[in-house]
Amino acid sequence: MKKMPSASCDALLDDIEDIVSQQDSKPQDRHFARKHIVPKVRRRNTQKYLQEEDSPPSDSTIPGIQKIWIRTWGCSHNNSDGEYMAGQLAAYGYKITENASDADLWLLNSCTVKNPAEDHFRNSIKKAQEENKKVVLAGCVPQAQPRQDYLQGLSVIGVQQIDRVVEVVEETIKGHSVRLLGQKKDNGKRLGGAPLDLPKIRKNPLIEIISVNTGCLNACTYCKTKHARGNLASYPIDELVDRAKQSFQEGVCEIWLTSEDTGAYGRDIGTNLPALLWKLVEVIPEGAMLRLGMTNPPYILEHLEEMAKILNHPRVYAFLHIPVQSASDAVLMGMKREYCLADFRRVVDFLKEKVPGITIATDVICGFPGETDQDFQETVKLVEEYKFPSLFINQFYPRPGTPAAKLEQVPAQVKKQRTKDLSRVFHSYSPYDHKIGERQQVLVTEESFDSKFYVAHNRFYEQVLVPKNPTFMGKMVEVDIYESGKHFMKGQPVADARIHTPSISKPLAKGEVSGLTEEFRNRLGNPLSSGSHIPATTQRASARSRLALQLQRLRRDSALMMSVGLALFALLLAFFVKVYN
């Protein structure tokens, strides 16, 4: 965290009395004069005055008091970035609102993986402009293609600059357009990104998303994310472990590790994923769980033995997301995936043998340029053979600026049909029917979309719906499975079974800011939440702190301008002396 400069006088005085001249009145004179002053009492509406002080007008141009609506598209890495930006803005005094129409500024955090996600992003920008909202753009779209026409004139914050979101929002509120798209570096070496100890507002107070690295080592011909996130840059193990410890201290009971390729972690800093995981499991409380993120086959092949041991650990979900994308080696070569089908099979078969019951999730792209009917049928056969319980089926979209976009495309109708055909195969089997009657331990972390159940996950990160008993939230509960669907099971809590609480501290309230360091608290007046329940005294303290910061910046800028002016004056003086001599 960058330390703000402290306010100081430009010159030192030997004694405070040096600033009093002979003509100034003496203290005793001023005291005598006060006796002859008759104060005039003016009545005022005190309640109205207090309300005005606590709640500045919403259309005020003073930064730090506006309402901000944040919308995030895409992966868990992007969601983590969104949580960090929300936390910093709330800590500074802005109110994070879930009501877009009520907001003064929209912070739009984009995803560039597929065309539909970017279309939603573009439409949101247009809507914001129609409603005269201030706009700040973030995420992979503006980072990868900042010169697109529809981004011109708008403020942009890069994926590695999220620790400066307050500055960008502040300037945007003032009516300025700001762009911060640089990379974080230390002695010329690219870093994983913004510091991990920044304030954040977790979407779910029970789940912490930790980005272990940014970027990847691949150069897939269809991928636009590479243009935004760049090459692999990993966070040090000790920083990641410290972040996990802090999260558990704040009541988190589940951690997700995420990145563009978790399996490649550490290759740029002389370590590897198993080394990180063994350090993390040492600090996970009993009953809390760790979920691994997506890993490509090439970077896990050499660690299979260690990964199997880790996935068998009682505090690690026996779950791994390994994208195959296609079962055709010809298509994989065209994608530049750097593995063949045999490599994928080796990884999956080994883990299924060594980690009984493991859940393998995978991805498939339908209609990549050059994919033949025979290529597609090979993918269908792979899905029929392994019956993946979690399968993400994506129609190919040519992304601008990628090599795959320049290739001859498969007709749109063919791509759509293949997507439908593979979806039909996926829905032809039921992965959880054989588990009816089992007794399972599940960790309850969220509410279902229809608000009828709580959502829990078992040892294999399979979704189990349980009754909405408030005492279950954030707890490890024992249930009997009595029903199953395509994507879930339903469990009945066992009577008189012990309910285990994995959290070592009380979880933060929804919307509460986590990770506020002493430096941040002292500088910003210690606002603890983005909600309206922040005390008025705290809001006033935060406003005073912001004013102090702005005055410090003004002094700093004035000093800089004075220095530049003096330098120019010295140059001019030297020039004239030389001319006239």
Image (tube, grey):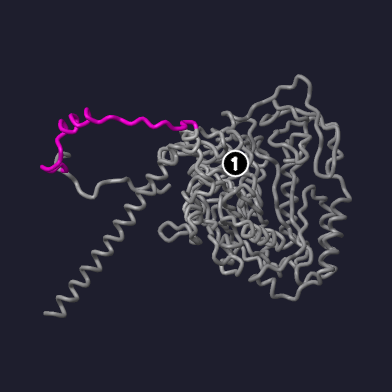
Q: Nearer the viewer, residue 311 or 207?
A: 207
Which secondary structure class fits the magenta region best? loop
Q: Nearer the viewer, residue 498 or 225?
A: 225
Q: Residue at x 40, y 41 (%)?
A: 545
Within the magenta stretch, is there residue 14?
Answer: no
Residue 187 can be seen, yes or no:
yes
Res. 43 image quadrant: top left
Q: Position of residue 346 (x, y in %)?
A: 73, 54
Q: Residue furthest right?
A: 428
Q: Give the residue pinned by disc 1.
A: 202
Q: Position of residue 443 (x, y in %)?
A: 70, 33
Q: Is residue 56 above or below residue 579?
A: above
Residue 238 can be seen, yes or no:
no
Q: Position of residue 117 (x, y in %)?
A: 69, 59
Secondary-structure class at tag 1: loop
Q: Nearer the viewer, residue 66 or 339?
A: 66
What amino acid is found at the position of numbered circle 1 in the picture? Arg
Q: Is residue 185 above or below residue 40?
A: below
Res. 371 image quadrant: bottom right
Q: Residues within 10 Å of mark 1 (few under 14, many from 20)?
A: many
Q: Is residue 466 above or below residue 141?
A: above
Q: The C terminus lies in which quarter of the figure?
A: bottom left
Within the magenta stretch, is there residue 41?
Answer: yes
Q: Nearer the viewer, residue 175 or 484?
A: 175
Res. 31 image quadrant: top left
Q: Which residues are magenta?
A: 19-47
Q: Residue at x 59, y 38 (%)?
A: 511
Q: Is residue 395 left or right of residue 107?
A: right
